[in-house]
Image (cartoon, rainbow, N blue to C red):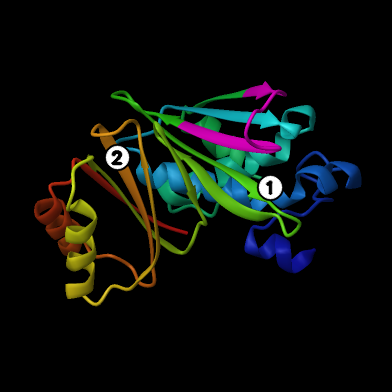
Amino acid sequence: YVAAGLRGDMVPTAVNIAPVPPEVMEAVGPFIPVAEALGSAVAQVARGPVTEIEIHFIGHLAEQDTRILKTAALKGLLTVVTQDAINFVNANHYAEQRGIAISEHKRADSLDYVSLMVVVAKTEEREFKVGATLIGKKNEPRLVTFNQFDIDMAPSEHMLFLQYSDVPGVVGKVGTALGENNINIASMQVGRTEEGGTALMGINVDTPISDALMDRINAKAEVAEAWRIEL
């Protein structure tokens, strides 16, 4: 556990945090990296300082002790917004110190997933939302919620999300812009609110996307909003 503590990873028996019983770790442990990734993702997506965090546990997770998942989400978020060394011991303290209001919400009934975790970050202007689940015997993570959109996307180190009007040709323009800059697309998922309405494109790419390329994609494809996430 010493190496894990030095890395800022979860140490089940750390004296500064409530001990996590083995049965709790068995139930929620696979979600710890997911929770941290969601916190990091929503911090990168939010426009402006985050003033409030809502963490939603839906399905089987709602019946568990989820305190460690809340801490993991805060660790992910604060690692993005501060240069301080954030870990499982101090994450809750730092969030309180920054005046971030935190609330947990649990709902046992779930139509679509056995367990779902959604992190909502609120700023003075609006709110941003990212949700994920685990699927299959290997507990593979899937991003399934991005703001108001449903999506089914495996998280990766470099991701790009584009919100645009659901009209023909946008996907091709985005692909062309990435290809012209030697950015390889690993996979792409599209979700939309309704036919001809607003759509979301989620793209896994192999390398980081620069500010200049973000601007070019926005102009070339007439994108309403664009976000990049590095995990």
Query: Where is 207 relative to 143, above or below?
Result: below
Residue 82 visible (yes or no): no
**First-in-chain label (1 vs 2):** 1
- Residue 45, given in percent of the width and then of the height, sits at 36, 43
Residue 119 included in the magenta stretch of the image = yes
The picture quadrant where one finds residue 50 is top left
Residue 8 versus residue 15 in the image, above or below: below
**How many marks on residues?**
2
Disc 1 secondary structure class: helix
Magenta stretch encompasses residue 15:
no
For marks 1 and 2, give the CA distance: 28 Å
Name the residue furthest bottom.
182
* Snapshot quadrant of residue 93: top right
Which element type, helix, strand or loop, lies under badge 2? strand
- Residue type marked 2: Ala
Instruction: Residue type at mark 1: give it.
Output: Phe
Residue 146, label in figure: none
> Residue, x 30% and y 35% (percent of image)?
48
Position of residue 100 in the picture relative to residue 137 (left or right): left
Determine which quarter of the picture holds residue 171.
bottom left
Near-viewer residue (9 or 162): 162
Residue 41 visible in the displayed image: yes
| Magenta part of the chain | 105-120
Looking at the image, residue 4 sits to the left or right of residue 118; the answer is right
Q: Tell me if mark 1 has few (under 14), some (14-19) or many (20+) residues whose alpha carbon lies within 10 angstroms of its own.
A: many
Tell me the number on the disc at residue 199: 2
Residue 60: x, y in percent? 75, 33
The residue singled out by tag 1 in the image is 31
Q: Is residue 16 above or below residue 60?
A: below
Q: Residues within 10 Å of mark 2 (few under 14, many from 20)?
A: many
